[in-house]
Image (cartoon, helix red, strand yellow):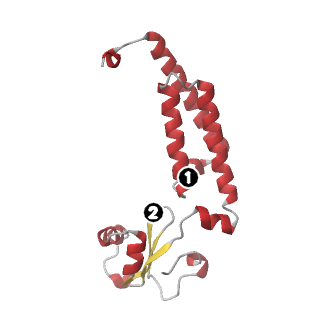
Amino acid sequence: MEKWFEFSWEALVAICISSVAIYIVVIAMTRICGKRSFSKMSSFDFAMTVAVGSIIATTILSKSVSLMDGTTGIVVVYLLQIGAALARRNDRVKKVMDNTPLLLMDGPIILEDNLRKGRVAKSDLRAKLREANVTELSEVKAVIFETTGDISVLHKSHDRPVEKFIIEDVAKS
């Protein structure tokens, strides 16, 4: 309990220096590795974001982790993320690493089994439809539960079918 109220100028200066240095390392690595480092593309990208946050916090606040240890950890996590992105170019690796987009609505028909598979509540589906300015189910061409956890709504703005490229990796059931 008494440690909570302990103050040390030495610790304060160390925290400030570590904070600035690790911040510079993260910015530099993000510039080198690209914006995808913090994008919401896959579960691996999410894990990378959490890992970077954890390393930052530990490096700044833990006396047992040196600035060099934190910098090394950050660089290794970024390199792993680049490696995972390169590996996902292979279709077999991509299937293992990423979720498959899932069709939740086929036109105005709600696919109940797919809602269960994706663990998507009807209330979440309704919210996404409202967010996409859908006022009638007949306006919907397709609703897709994306690999990122986002839900995409394709509108029925014309009578042409959705181009195959757009939905080629979407699981129908």
| Residue 86 occupies quadrant | bottom right
For mark 1, give the secondary structure: helix
Q: Find disc 1 in the rendering and name its residue.
A: 45
Residue pictured at 63% horizontal, 49% vertical:
81
Residue 158 place in picture, x, y as percent: 47, 85
Residue 91 place in picture, x, y as percent: 67, 68
Residue pictured at 61% horizontal, 36% vertical:
73
Residue pictured at 49% horizontal, 25% vertical:
62
Going from the N terminus, do you reach mark 2 or mark 1 first?
1
Count of picture labels: 2
Residue 112 place in picture, x, y as percent: 36, 80
Instruction: Say above or below: 88 vs 125.
Output: above
Per the rendering, the mark at residue 149 is: 2
| Residue 150 occupies quadrant | bottom left
Per the rendering, the mark at residue 104 is: none
* Amino acid found under the numbered disc labelled 1: Asp
Instruction: Say above or below: 42 vs 60.
Output: below
| Residue 22 occupies quadrant | top right
The crowding category of the residue bearing disc 2, from other C-alpha atoms within 10 Å (few below 14, some 14 to 19, many at least 20), is some
Q: Is residue 5 left or right of residue 93?
A: left
For mark 2, give the secondary structure: loop
The crowding category of the residue bearing disc 1, from other C-alpha atoms within 10 Å (few below 14, some 14 to 19, many at least 20), is many
* Amino acid found under the numbered disc labelled 2: Gly
Q: Is residue 108 left or right of residue 50?
A: left
Residue pictured at 32% horizontal, 69% vertical:
121
Residue 10 place in picture, x, y as percent: 48, 11
Q: Is residue 82 left or right of residue 64?
A: right
